[in-house]
Amino acid sequence: MLRKNTYNELLKIATKIRSYIGIGALTLLILIVLFAMKADGKSYVGFVTASFEQTLSFNGKILNGNLIAFIILQMLIVHVPLLIALVTGDLISGEEATGTVRMLATKPISRTGIVLSKWFAATIYTLIMTLWLGFLSLFVAKWMFGTGDLIVLNSEGLLVLPESELAWRFGLSLMIAFLALWTVATLSMAFSAFAKNSVGPIVSTMSVIILFTIIGTLDVSVFDSIKPFMFTTHMAAWRSVFEDPFPTSTIVESVVVLMLHILVLLGITLYRFNKKDITS
Amino acid sequence: MKPWIFLGFLVIVANFYSQTADALLKSVVNKINLVNDYKAELQVKASIPFIKVPIANATIYFKKKDKFKVESKGIAILPKQGLSDLTGFLGKTSAYSSVLGEEKTINDHKTQLVSVLPSDENSEIILAKVYISASDALIYRTVLTTKNSGTVSIDYEYNHNKQYGLPSKMTFKVDIKKFKMPKSVASDIRNNDQKKKYKENEKGTIILTFTSYTVNQGISDDIFKAD
């Protein structure tokens, strides 16, 4: 029954126009970035290497598909959560807004089953979005710009990662990005369980992300103790995959924190939906 | 001694030393001029503050007078000064004046310092201190003071292509200016650790190892065309 209901939930997602807004917007954004890089990517690279250009010369193909993929991931990982929340924030509250939640509850499936099937559907949608992001940023960018070593700029300076190491790093970074987006999807579902319309959960999800991100970027010691517990801090863990030496403990910590967030938020959603008065 | 005799003596001595410096440089330039073109495999090992880069392999091409190209599949970081421009600069004997300096032993080679001062006020090189071994007419060390790249020190090692003055190994020590991170490019919100502090006059080392030289075999001009 759970599988059948998950399939039904996926069908519901597939029939809604808003589900394609996310994929369409993502495609358009990536195509714009690819076009911009094709037109004026060299000046962007110059911006990265500017601090060293007077003394050193950088030879080889710096502007390649791997760098473009990294830039796209860096740019979009902040915005994709909105596109995810647009769909997942509607999953429970949408049923309430249209009144179909009562009909749904008459099915031979528990309320926990209903939430889990919606959550599985949200997970699959998030996975599709992540894979689409990966496909466009990696494969299309490589097809357009070729391949090569990756030059990464971080607060420590410049790091050049050899091409041979990049396949697994990109794979792992996409997995962590998926985990981060999955957390956002679960958060918006949790908000959705409390709301009676779709706008509230979507706006609330984005507000939380913006608020936590701002707190995370503020270099004030007051927030240092809470930063490690905020999921937004760990949403950037995909970037740590491109560090050398590989920060295993940091990445494991981020994965654990994100997983815990998912479990706690799912627990809240289940508790709330089971207690929800849908009869009046 | 009358002053004009002393002055005359000074002029003769200065002229003698200048001629010796010119002669030393000429012996080096004559060797370099034997090379019309060359191709070599290059291994680049860089240890630079604020930059972490794996060992890179590249192919370099040179053709007289000043055609030079580095072809690398990966990203190779090379010094901006002292690779191909120095030999070109020394080749233009009318573009500088030279003065003989101290003797110094570098890697068991007895060398003589020749200070080279460019005549052109717009020259990127302000001063080149070239340590030349008179016995084999080879440069064993160069210290370049430049307008934009700070000071670059280069140590040379030779093996099979001594007759052309082509080194088998070059060790560059370059000044690294303070690294300024463009914040819009690197949004590293996780990193709250103490950042690496810049120390004044930090030096970076780049070791270039040359192998498989092919000298004077002819190189097509097409190779030097921009990609």
Image (cartoon, rainbow, N blue to C red):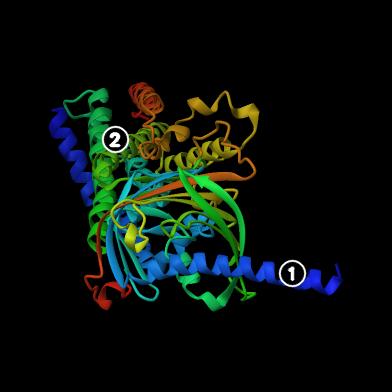
Residue at 59% x, 27% y is A224
Q: Residues within 10 Å of mark 1 (few under 14, many from 20)?
A: few
Visible in this render: residue B150? yes
Contact (Cβ within 8 Å) of mark 1 with mark 2? no
- Judged by depth in the image, the label closer to the viewer, 1 or 2, is 1
Q: What residue type is labelled 1?
A: Phe
Identify the residue shown where x is 48% and y is 39%: A209
Comparing A155 with A90, the one in front is A155
Give the image location of residue B44, x and y in percent.
36, 49
Please identify the residue farthest to the front as the structure is shown.
B1
Tell me the residue that label 1 is attached to: B9
Give percent across and percent down for residue B192: 55, 33
* Between A19 and B210, the one nearer to me in the picture: B210
Badge 2 element: helix
Q: How far apart are labels 1 and 2 at the CA level?
A: 109 Å
The amino acid pointed to by label 2 is Val
The chain to which mark 2 is attached is: A
Mark seen at residue A101? 2
Q: Which chain carries label 1?
A: B
Q: Is residue A127 left or right of residue A213?
A: left
